[in-house]
Image (cartoon, rainbow, N blue to C red):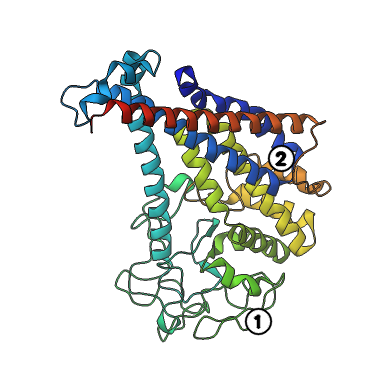
């Protein structure tokens, strides 16, 4: 095993060049998938090797529950500098586990509370909240809260932001005011009477601005019946993709819609629907976990956050047929929007180099390639990162097999 056990911990450095070049020279869809796959493999390999080194360090601790054979000199000799790195790997692996668990818990909490906040509205592909804070994001569906409630109505919980009693601000912070939409006693929402969303008799409507379709066009198109089935497909054929989104919804506030023109609203909804269709939340969550597992993978996390937005930009431009309109929508939303409630949720005005996205949309569409040519700089960087990923996988597999065989031989039956 030798020093090869340490290679997966530093081989993520080989992916740094392609993380930057892929943003500029690859199609966003290709770049997102490539960088996410590399980050996941490199993070898994480094975590496995960190665990192998921790076994050696844990076996040296007094009172450990491991077999006595695991502290055998032959086992310790398999790892160079076992007395130092073995004990240092214990807090390092604990930090990785805690960081990843915290990321997963926050992601699940944000999604659960966001679905709970929308439980008072009938299920629609677009949920428009009457809030004075401008924001929009794509909320993936789930087993709970993502389906259509019985009778097309929501539950009886309190409509709130991602924390009780507060509206969503940048970074998940809240201003302490109530997020309007339902009263805390479960009655008629405040501030919606006469607005078309909730009539005065207490019945809930569609949750859409009066006289306005979800995609910014004429009313009466894309409505749903009492069972949540669409009666007409909005522009771009989005109605045919509702089932594929598995209950995912586009969450947007009236404050943001009021600042966008009808064409820009269509760009907004097309952008968020692209996030739902491609399940960009999974890519963002994967690179977030990878960056927690190995800090050397943070450049890939930043790159994927950008390429996922560029991917949705291109899909929105193709859906509405105007790259300039999407660019204007991004620029307007970036000036007034509060961003997304969590880094694992995607949105039109997500944090990042917005001017680069606008400049890319004002230029020609990117070429679609499954793999860059080796004669180009991005091709060389991609092959270098692929080689580093392959070496990391082989090193971790070899180290794992070697350690298992040594432990099996050192442990008495």
Q: Is residue 201 visible?
A: yes
> Of label 1 and label 2, which has the lower sequence position?
1
Q: Where is residue 84? Give x, y as percent.
A: 34, 14
- Quadrant holding the C terminus: top left
Q: CB of mark 1 within 8 Å of CB of mark 2?
A: no
145 left or right of 376? left
- Circle 1: element type: loop
Which of the two marks, 1 or 2, is nearer to us in this view?
1
Of 333 and 96, nearer the camera is 96
Q: Is residue 331 visible?
A: no
Of 318 and 348, nearer the camera is 318
Q: Which mark is residue 137?
A: none
Q: Tell me: residue 396, above or below residue 204.
A: above
Q: Where is residue 215? Give x, y as percent.
A: 66, 69
- Quadrant holding the N terminus: top left
Q: Tell me: residue 364, above or below residue 398.
A: below
Residue at 36% from the left image edge and 74% from the top image edge: 155
Residue at 70% from the left image edge and 38% from the top image edge: 23
Of 206 and 360, nearer the camera is 360
- Circle 2: element type: helix
Q: Residue furthest left?
A: 63
Q: Which residue is mark 2?
A: 356
Q: Which residue is mark 1?
A: 232
Give neighbour class at mark 1: few <14, some 14-19, many 20+ (Cα, 10 Å).
some
Q: Tell me: residue 296, above or below residue 370.
A: above
**Where is residue 145, by image quadrant?**
bottom left
Give neighbour class at mark 2: few <14, some 14-19, many 20+ (Cα, 10 Å).
few
Q: Tell me: residue 407, above or below residue 81.
A: below
3D distance between C-alphas at marks 1 and 2: 36 Å
């Amino acid at each position: 095993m030798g020093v090869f056990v340490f290679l997966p911990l530093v081989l993520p450095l080989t992916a740094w060049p392609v993380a930057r070049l892929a943003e500029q020279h690859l199609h966003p869809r290709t770049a997102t998938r490539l960088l996410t796959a590399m980050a996941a493999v490199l993070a898994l390999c480094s975590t496995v090797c960190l665990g192998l080194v921790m076994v050696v360090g844990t076996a040296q601790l007094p009172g450990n529950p491991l077999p006595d054979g695991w502290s055998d000199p032959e086992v310790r000799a398999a790892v160079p500098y076992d007395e130092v790195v073995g004990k240092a790997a214990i807090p390092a692996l604990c930090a990785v586990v805690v960081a990843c668990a915290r990321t997963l818990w926050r992601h699940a909490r944000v999604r659960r509370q966001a679905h709970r906040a929308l439980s008072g509205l009938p299920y629609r592909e677009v949920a428009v909240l009457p809030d004075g804070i401008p924001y929009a994001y794509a909320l993936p569906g789930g087993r709970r809260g993502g389906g259509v409630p019985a009778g097309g109505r929501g539950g009886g919980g309190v409509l709130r932001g991602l924390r009780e009693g507060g509206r969503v601000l940048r970074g998940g912070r809240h201003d302490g005011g109530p997020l309007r939409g339902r009263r805390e006693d479960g009655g008629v929402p405040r501030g919606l009477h006469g607005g078309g969303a909730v009539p005065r008799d207490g019945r809930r409507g569609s949750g859409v601005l009066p006289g306005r379709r979800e995609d910014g066009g004429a009313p009466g198109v894309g409505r749903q019946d009492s069972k949540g089935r669409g009666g007409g497909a909005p522009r771009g054929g989005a109605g045919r993709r509702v089932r594929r989104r598995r209950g995912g919804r586009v969450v947007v506030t009236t404050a943001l819609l009021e600042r966008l023109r009808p064409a820009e609203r269509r760009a907004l909804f097309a952008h968020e629907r692209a996030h739902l269709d491609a399940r960009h939340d999974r890519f963002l969550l994967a690179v977030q976990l990878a960056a927690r597992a190995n800090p050397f993978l943070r450049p890939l996390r930043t790159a994927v956050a950008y390429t996922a937005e560029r991917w949705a930009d291109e899909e929105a431009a193709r859906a509405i047929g105007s790259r300039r309109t999407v660019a204007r929508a991004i620029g307007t939303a970036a000036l007034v929007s509060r961003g997304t409630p969590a880094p694992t949720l995607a949105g039109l005005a997500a944090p990042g180099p917005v001017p680069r996205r606008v400049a890319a949309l004002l230029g020609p569409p990117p070429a679609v390639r499954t793999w860059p040519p080796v004669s180009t700089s991005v091709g060389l960087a991609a092959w270098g990162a692929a080689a580093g990923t392959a070496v990391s996988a082989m090193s971790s597999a070899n180290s794992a097999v070697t350690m298992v065989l040594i432990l099996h031989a050192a442990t008495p039956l």
